[in-house]
Amino acid sequence: MHAVITIERLPSRHTTYLIGPSARWMFSAIEGVSDVLVEREDINHVTLSYQWADPGIHSVGIDEMLQSQGMRRVEKGRR
């Protein structure tokens, strides 16, 4: 299944200039996720596209994983 997610940096929590490489690395490490690509990136946001084997396999815990790295998922309509 093809999926797209937009992620934003938490205010003053991330130390690198762009968050795309970190977000891409995190998603690539999730079991069942492949072909992770940075589709769009600016200083505070990144949009990733990826393939996943099962919609339920990584949805639990993804927000905690992102938050631990100074990021959060952007809900639809928030950007």
Image: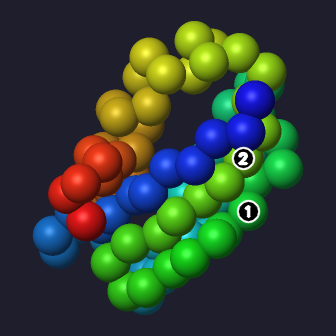
**What is the distance, in whole Å, between disc 1 and disc 2 at their CAs?**
6 Å
- Indicate the position of residue 53 as horizontal and vertical percent values: 79, 21
- Indicate the position of residue 61 as horizontal and vertical percent values: 42, 23
Q: Which amino acid does label 1 sit on?
A: Leu
- Residue depicted at 49% across the width and 22% down the height: 59
**Residue 25 visible in image:** no
Q: Residue furthest right?
A: 35
Say few, some or many: other residues with alpha carbon within 10 Å of mark 1 (under 14 / 14 to 19 / 20 or more).
some
Q: In this view, does 18 lie to the left or right of 77?
A: right
Q: In this view, does 65 lie above or below 31?
A: below
Q: Which of 18 and 16 is in front in this view?
A: 18
**Residue 20 visible in image:** yes
Which residue is under mark 2? Answer: 50
Q: In this view, does 2 lie above or below 59?
A: below
Q: Which residue lies furthest to the left in this view?
A: 11
Q: What residue type is labelled 2?
A: Tyr
Q: Are marks 1 and 2 in contact (CB under 8 Å)?
A: yes
Circle 1 — which element? Answer: strand
